[in-house]
């Protein structure tokens, strides 16, 4: 009898089937995978690096039409010449303009900002004289808020809420891995100076003199140090203006020997809110009518690579600790967005489905082969999945619905290697009961080793080209080929190293004499599943007419099912629809409408939005 060459698979099995390292490998794979499962950042979607850089230009005194020709268009040409800039957008209005550069997907955010900064600095001579140096601000996916907290309260004004929100913002920023934080709807206090043209003319004061005097007076200067009785004293000139009365008492000039103050030519008053937008928080009352008032929202983003679930949880824990102290009892804090919670829910749901798929395969092996073989599969699949999660952690991927979709997608493929090895070992043990079980297992793995390697590499070769997809879909879909390919490679090594070791320990003492009677090659009997299959298949395959009829009916049903795609009864999507708990209503009013008019329309629409039920 010719001895089967061991090959790569057989030699790996021979090296590890009796090795004390094999159980250590199993424990190490389980430990590393569990650590990766806990440590992997959880997000709703893969984070795509699409750096965007905003260039803000102040063009005081220029109308939008003039600013386009003098500022915006020259800057667009300049920015477009920067390497890896994919698109250039611009927005121009009276007295200001903004040019946005969007870089190629995958470009480093730091590199993008540096390139724009260097290019603009090197070409400042192209900007008209009198235009201040542009402000360059980088934007990225990590600037998107993962958590928003809306502060509201009965009888509280926007100023009261703003003061609390700013204190809360300072405290929240101290939380680990918190990134950008900002306020929406905050009331900006100001002292407004309203000049009276008649009184300016009466006292011979120009508008420039008034503005210059107020600007120069509202400042302090450190003029040096004084020594007095052995102490160093800082000498400060000027003071910061904090009240309308202080601004009104500023001396402008003299007229006919009489001093002229700011209050003589202008009305000075305190303005509580100078914001050009209104934010409100509405809730449904017991009578079904919306009630509410002013609100201020604190938006919190995370740092790059941080776990959204952990960051959001830490922030909410800190906010709860501040209730009753920094946050007054009258202030209600409502969580209006929590991507940490939704990301955790999606990850847990997909992990649950991953577990269901694993249990289904184990149950199928139990019914078709036996309980010992199903126990081996119950160990092999979790080991392979946890090794894949560890590889995803090392490669820098996150735990999101795309990466978990890759595992669910590949679980049916990766278990094939283990089942093929288990079946062949089972067959070899039944073929020759006198041969040592270990030797028979090695030969069984060697027999199917090369086809298993080819099948694994074929699947990997079919998946890897997805990594070369460009544009936004490339990084978004990259977890599928990366994780699925890693799962396939790990499944091969687990099948030829761990599976034979488990078969010898778990099923090595099973009586296999019954298998020798199955067929001439000692094939597995297949159990009740095979018997039921034969009962259905034999009548169909008994004659040519029956076989042909069955083939035609199957083909007709298969192609007929495609009509559901044409009628759109079945929607074609790569990923399932996302269930969001947010609803956005966009209201467009005629250009030039006051913000108060928009607020009235929004309040009219709010009741129908709040009362909507699924």
Image (cartoon, grey):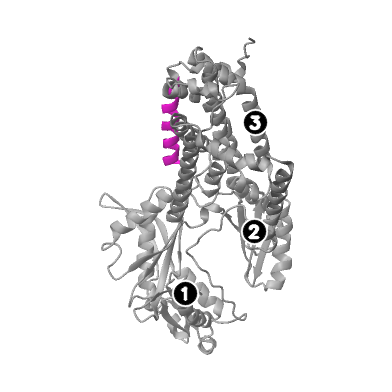
What secondary structure is found at the residue carrying circle 2?
strand
Is disc 2 in contact with disc 3, using a CB cutoff of under 8 Å?
no
Q: In front: 206, or 25?
A: 25
Magenta stretch, overall SS: helix
Which residue is labeled 3 in the image?
455
Instruction: Judge by depth and name the residue closer to the eye, 108 or 97.
Output: 108
Task: Verify whether residue 38 appears in magenta.
Answer: yes
Q: Position of residue 400 (x, y in %)?
A: 51, 48
Horizontal arrangement in the rendering, residue 398 relative to residue 94 (left or right): left
Q: Nearer the viewer, mark 3 or mark 1?
A: 3
| Residue extent of the magenta highlight | 22-41
- Tell me the number on the disc at residue 100: 2
Q: Residue at x 48, y 32 (%)?
A: 377
Q: Are marks 2 and 1 in contact (CB under 8 Å)?
A: no
| Circles 3 and 1: CB atoms closer than 8 Å | no
Q: Position of residue 313 (x, y in %)?
A: 37, 52
């Amino acid at each position: 009898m010719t001895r089967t060459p061991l090959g790569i698979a057989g030699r790996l099995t021979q090296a590890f089937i009796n090795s004390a390292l094999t159980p250590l490998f199993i424990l190490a794979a389980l430990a590393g995978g569990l650590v990766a499962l806990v440590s992997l950042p959880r997000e709703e979607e893969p984070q795509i690096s699409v750096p965007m850089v905003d260039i803000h230009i102040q063009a005081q005194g220029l109308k939008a039409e003039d600013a386009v020709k003098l500022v915006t268009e020259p800057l667009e040409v300049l920015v477009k010449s920067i390497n890896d800039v994919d698109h250039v957008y611009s927005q121009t209005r009276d007295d200001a303009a903004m040019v946005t550069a969007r870089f190629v997907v995958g470009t480093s955010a730091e590199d993008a900002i540096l390139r724009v900064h260097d290019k603009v600095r090197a070409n400042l001579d192209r900007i008209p004289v009198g235009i201040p140096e542009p402000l360059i601000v980088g934007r990225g996916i990590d600037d998107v808020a993962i958590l928003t907290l809306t502060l509201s309260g009965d009888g509280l004004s926007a100023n009261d809420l703003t003061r609390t929100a700013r204190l809360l913002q300072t405290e929240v920023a101290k939380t680990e891995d918190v990134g950008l934080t900002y306020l929406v709807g905050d009331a900006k206090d100001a002292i407004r100076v309203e000049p009276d043209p008649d009184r300016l003319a009466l006292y011979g004061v120009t508008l420039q003199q008034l503005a210059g005097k107020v600007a120069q007076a509202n400042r302090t200067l450190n003029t040096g140090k004084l020594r007095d009785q052995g102490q160093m004293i800082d000498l400060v000139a000027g003071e910061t203006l904090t009240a309308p009365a202080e601004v009104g008492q500023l001396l402008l000039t003299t007229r006919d020997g009489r001093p002229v103050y700011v209050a003589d030519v202008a009305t000075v008053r305190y303005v509580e809110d100078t914001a050009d937008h209104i934010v409100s928080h509405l809730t449904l009352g017991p009578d079904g009518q919306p009630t509410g008032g002013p609100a201020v929202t604190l938006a919190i983003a995370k740092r790059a690579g941080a776990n959204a679930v952990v960051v959001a949880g830490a922030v909410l824990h800190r906010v709860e600790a501040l209730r009753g102290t920094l946050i007054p009892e009258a202030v209600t804090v409502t969580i209006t967005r929590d991507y940490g919670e939704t990301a955790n829910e999606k990850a847990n749901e997909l992990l649950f489905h991953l577990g269901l798929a694993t249990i289904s395969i184990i149950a199928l092996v139990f019914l078709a082969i036996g309980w010992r073989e199903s126990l081996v599969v119950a160990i092999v699949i979790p080991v392979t999945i946890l090794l894949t999660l560890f590889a995803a952690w090392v490669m820098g991927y996150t735990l999101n619905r795309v990466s978990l979709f890759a595992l669910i997608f590949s679980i049916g493929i990766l278990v094939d290697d283990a089942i093929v090895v288990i079946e062949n070992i089972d067959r070899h043990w039944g073929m020759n009961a006198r041969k040592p079980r270990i030797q028979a297992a090695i030969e069984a793995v060697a027999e199917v080793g090369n086809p298993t390697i080819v099948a694994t590499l074929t699947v990997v070769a079919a998946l890897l080209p997805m990594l070369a997809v460009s544009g936004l879909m490339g990084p978004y879909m990259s977890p599928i080929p990366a994780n699925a390919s890693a799962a396939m490679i790990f499944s091969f090594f687990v099948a030829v190293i761990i599976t034979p070791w488990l078969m010898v320990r778990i099923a090595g003492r099973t009586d296999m004499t019954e298998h020798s009677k199955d067929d001439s090659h000692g094939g597995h009997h297949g159990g009740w599943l095979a018997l039921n299959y034969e009962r259905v298949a034999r009548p169909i395959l008994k004659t040519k007419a029956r076989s042909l009829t069955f083939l035609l009916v199957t083909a007709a049903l298969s192609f007929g099912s495609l009509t559901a795609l044409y009628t759109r009864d079945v929607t074609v999507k790569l990923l399932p629809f996302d269930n969001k708990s947010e609803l956005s209503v966009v209201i467009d009013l005629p250009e030039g409408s006051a913000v108060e008019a928009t607020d009235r329309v929004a309040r009219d629409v709010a009741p129908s939005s709040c009362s909507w039920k699924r």
